[in-house]
Image (cartoon, rainbow, N blue to C red):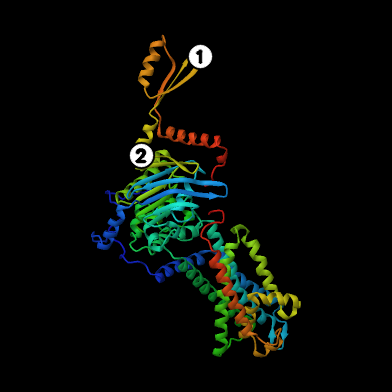
Amino acid sequence: MRPFRASGGRRLTLGSESSDGTMDASARLARLDHMSAPAIRVTDLHKHYGDLHAVDGLDLEIPRGEVFALLGPNGAGKSTTVEILEGFRKRTSGEVEVLGADPQSASKQWRHRVGVMLQGTSERGLLTARESLQYAARLYPNALDVDEMLAAVGLTEKAGAKPATLSGGQRRRLDVALALIGRPELVFLDEPTTGFDPEARRQFWGLIESVREDGTTVVLTTHYLDEADHLADRIGIIASGRLVALDTPEGLRSRASDAQISWVEDGAHRVEHTATASAFLRDLLSRTPGEIEALEVRHPSLEDVYLQLIGDTQRAASADPDETEEATS
Amino acid sequence: MTATTASSTPTWMSMTRARLSVELKEFFRSREQMVFIFFFPMMLLLLFGSVFGGEEIAPGVTFAQYFLAGMVASGILNTGFQSLAMTISIDRDEDVLKRIHGTPLPATSYFAAKVAQVLLVSAVQVSLLIAMGVVLYDVTLPTDAGHWWTFAWVFLLGTAAATTLGIAMSTLLRNAKSGSAVITPIVLFLQFTSGVFLVYTEIPTFLQHVAEIFPLKWLAQGMRSVFLPEDFAAVEARGSWELTTGAIVLAAWVIIGLVLAVRTFRWTRHDDN
């Protein structure tokens, strides 16, 4: 398999640069103008399906150029939120601004600036990878070169293949290419690496990093915490239709600074969570003569923090009789 | 990246052309479509033509000739209505429409490309059927402009009605799996009552009246006025080709189809809102 990034560190240039490297004056002005406002601004977003509150008062602001990862269990309102931002679903209430416009009334000009990669993929298509990209390129004012795009996602050798003869991972890479061909300022990637082997995921991360270097805002949803940790500037965790955490990966990790100390005492398994692990251990050691059975000190991973946040929300939800139902995605 | 295309906003025409070329590639690469649209009507024409073809239903007019006009009419219905409703509904179920909606392609470009695809495919299909009629069943082609003008407007109005109704129908089918079970009986009923498989004047009067509501009857009668001798008009249900009424009914269906298509169309699945 070819790497996503062409050899020699060639970058995928997604900005409005023309072939001689100079930026069109009006494009530069437009871009500067856009730079000041956030890419996405969501205030008190609600989406109800009857009694079901799939999104229940969500606030979010994503600045330009950020790689933002939205995490959450299935049915938490993740996909519903993203599809409202993409202009596919209508909201029940709340304010939504994406690249300065309401996606619900998306114009053609707005679509020029937004790339969308949907969840899942279809193998029924009858166009080859190159034909799909050539068609898509004809819809945008300043599209990338099709062959370079194919090379960037490692599909040069599969350019003449139809979806049915591509692997799941290759189809997903074609979907990424289709989302990026129009040089979007903002790109949505909905579970982009589901079904990838670890190698393909690493390569995909390289591609997203090169997209980030060009100042493109990336909003991705994922189930993989290591993916969010590796790629995202900030992570939002959504549960029961609300944002329960919004922080950098480091910030999230530091939330659960408590270490977990476990040991066996008088035949019983004991667990202690503490922010001052050393002090606790000193005390434990001094009051216990001889060997301490099964002593273990563990520091929480991002996954622990995530599971704890989700667990807290679900416990709170099940304690609240009004919110027993989980949202469908 | 080095080479980039010139920075200019694509026009409506260039996007529609791009979409049309995709639609045509997909059509001609789909074995099911090719069989259903081209092979199936030709097979029916051959089958009915060889079984009942020799029977004269009026002096100088064989059933095969009558049937040819009917097959041309129902071919238009198959391509514009049945096949279009099915393919759009499958595209909606598989999120193909949603993907299209995520690009700058205007809805009007999408529809224009669909209509153009249906027109081109129908033109090929109808030409094949007419050629078979001429070679196998002694159908004589009109030589005057008047009959060809009738052919042109019946073909265009019929295609427009079938296409807009097909797009509307694609939304009414709640999912593609049940599509064929819903559409096939409708089309078969119309084919039996509108003068395609059976001679229109030989079916019970009340069925004739039911068929008169729908476009296929008028499409078939319009095509008969083009391909059958002028004096056959006397044995039609009301003793004439009724071209004016036909034009009015077809135009009314175009408007109904257009309103339904525009008001009901959706890019996403029914369970996806």
Name which residue type carries label 1. Answer: Gly
> Could you say whether the residue bearing mark 1 is in a helix, strand or loop?
loop
What residue appears at the point 48 percent right and 50 percent down from the top-left corner?
A120
**Relative height, residue B249 to residue A5 (above, below):** below
SS category of the residue bearing label 2: loop
* Residue A139: image location, x then y, percent: 39, 64
Q: Residue furthest right?
A: B204
Question: Depth check: B175 or B226 in front?
Answer: B175
The residue singled out by tag 2 in the image is A248
* Image position of A106 (left or right of B169): left
| Crowding at mark 2 (Cα within 10 Å: few <14, some 14-19, many 20+) | some
Q: Chain of mark 2?
A: A
Residue count near mark 1 (Cα–Cα under 10 Å), binned few <14, some 14–19, many ≥20: few
Q: Which residue carries the number 1 mark?
A: A267
The residue shown at (36%, 18%) is: A279
Residue closer to the observer: A15 or B232:
A15
Can residue B256 be spotted in the picture?
A: yes
- B25 up-or-down from B63: above or below: above
